Amino acid sequence: MTTTDQRPATVATEQQIPLSDPRTAERMVAPVARCAVEIIRDMRPENALARIVTPEVATMLSRRAALTRRLRATTGYVPAQRIAVSGVRTCVVNERTVEASCVLRDPDRSRFLAMRWELRHSGWRVTVLEVG
């Protein structure tokens, strides 16, 4: 290989997980859940998960963020900054679908989050996201 070769360097790991493996989606549940709640709380930009979620889920997140902004403008309420993700559970429905849930805790409240991941032509995407 020469210095002008444009191929990316491969990282040697014990276990390479292919993109089509459901474990790929399972590893992303906690960070995506945290990011989704931060979008809803208007702590992150609305397009932070644009590459991972479907347009319908992105619309729902932006609608909830807009509601948070309106609530904050009228009441002045500022939520706690720290969110802890616990109780992550996943269920592999088939080789192209994974359903997951977790509990998100902060000092003020706890939330339950459920999501459905589907393997699309461009990778794993969140097709359903429910926050309670």
Image (cartoon, rainbow, N blue to C red):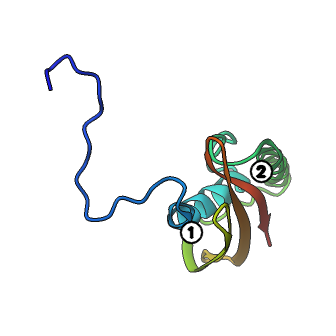
Where does the N terminus fall, quadrant-wise?
top left
Q: Is residue 78 left or right of residue 32?
A: right
Number of labels in the image equals 2
Residue 124, image x and y in percent? 62, 52
Q: Which mark is residue 105?
A: none
Where does the C terminus fall, quadrant-wise?
bottom right
Q: Which mark is residue 61?
A: 2
Kindly identify the residue that appears in the image at 69 percent across and 42 percent down.
Answer: 46
In this view, the residue farthest toward the bottom is: 87
The residue carrying pointer 1 sits among few (fewer than 14), some (14 to 19) or many (20 or more) residues within 10 Å by Cα, namely: some
Q: Which quadrant holds residue 77?
A: bottom right
Residue 39, image x and y in percent? 68, 51
In this view, the residue farthest toward the left is: 2
Label 1 element class: loop
Residue at which label 1 appears: 83
| Residue 81 shows in the view | no
Are discs 2 and 1 less than 8 Å apart at CB?
no
Q: Is residue 121 above or below residue 20?
A: above
* CA–CA distance in space, label 2 to label 1: 17 Å
Q: Is residue 57 above or below residue 50?
A: below
